[in-house]
Image (tube, coloured by chain):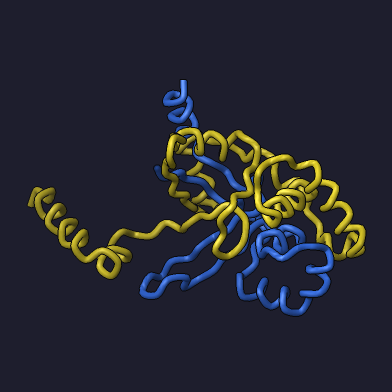
Chain colours: A blue, B yellow
Amino acid sequence: MIVRCALKRDSRIVEYDDLHAFCRENRNRAANAGIKDFGAIAAALGFDAYVRENIEAGIDEKVWVVVNRNALTFQREVLQYARQVLS
Amino acid sequence: MAQDLFHLLSTNELKKEIGTLVAKDKRTLPENSKIFAAIAHMQKFDQLPDLVGYKELNALIAVGHIELNRGMTATKGVPVALYVRELLIGAMYPGTLSSIGNGIYLATTQPTKLILPDAFPRLSKIAENTLRMMNPA
């Protein structure tokens, strides 16, 4: 099933490579706080999402990782369908 | 508004705050997932998303919101509808598998012709034939 949504236009978004660079520069600080995961670091920095391009060879596809669920707006109809199936 | 916790709190304060929330989290999750959930809670990132109808979502996308899609499938004994319901109105589940970090993985929308020729050559051929049959000319 495909769930359609939209990331709010005022969301704070960071490129994966920039996030990676931050992790390299601040690895001791993050590690001392017990944070190792990229998603956790992005959330701790206050970003809503991060995006990575060219994740798979031959496909011009971006992968978005949203760490703030509240930054998303979902299409309601899919929830109505889910409720019908589960009732 | 979310803040930069690395600047807002000292390393020890941040570690203590995360540790307190992780200790309260009784779910069977990897440590990294619980840490992500703790930070999401501190930033209020685990709140419910907005829900709108098809036309309203189209209108939002038209004014600059970024259209994204999430492919979901059932797993052993768990129907996909349950995952969908939890994603939209349930507790935020940080997940256990993450290739580039914890979070909600989403993909952009692309015209089918950009994807099919390289990734699925056989499907591309079927699509070509299907289009030909559907063309009234």
Determine whether, in the image, residue B4 is placed left or right of residue B96.
right
The residue at the point 50 percent across, 33 percent down is B82
Residue A56: give x, y in percent of width and height. Answer: 42, 71
Q: Is residue B112 left or right of residue B123?
A: right
Q: Where is residue B13 in the image (x, y as percent from the top left)?
A: 92, 58
The image shows residue B83 at horizontal and vertical percentages of 51, 38
Seen from the viewer's position, the closer of residues B40 and A6 is B40
Quarter-of-image position of residue B89: top right
Q: Give the camera-side residue of B102 and A79.
A: B102
| Residue located farthest toward the top when viewing the structure as drawn | A87
Q: Nearer the viewer, residue B36 or B64?
A: B36
Q: Quadrant of residue B72?
A: top left
Residue at the image point whose x is 50% and y is 63% from the top: A63
- The number of discs equals 0
Q: Which residue corresponds to the image point at 51% horizontal and 46% vertical from the top-left?
A: A5
Please tell me whether residue B35 is drawn above or below residue B11 in the rendered image: above
Residue B44 position within the rendered picture, expressed as x and y whole percent measured from the top left: 75, 45
Name the residue located 51 percent from the left edge and 55 percent from the top edge.
B106
In the figure, is residue B67 to the left or right of B21? left
Does B130 sit above or below residue B84? below
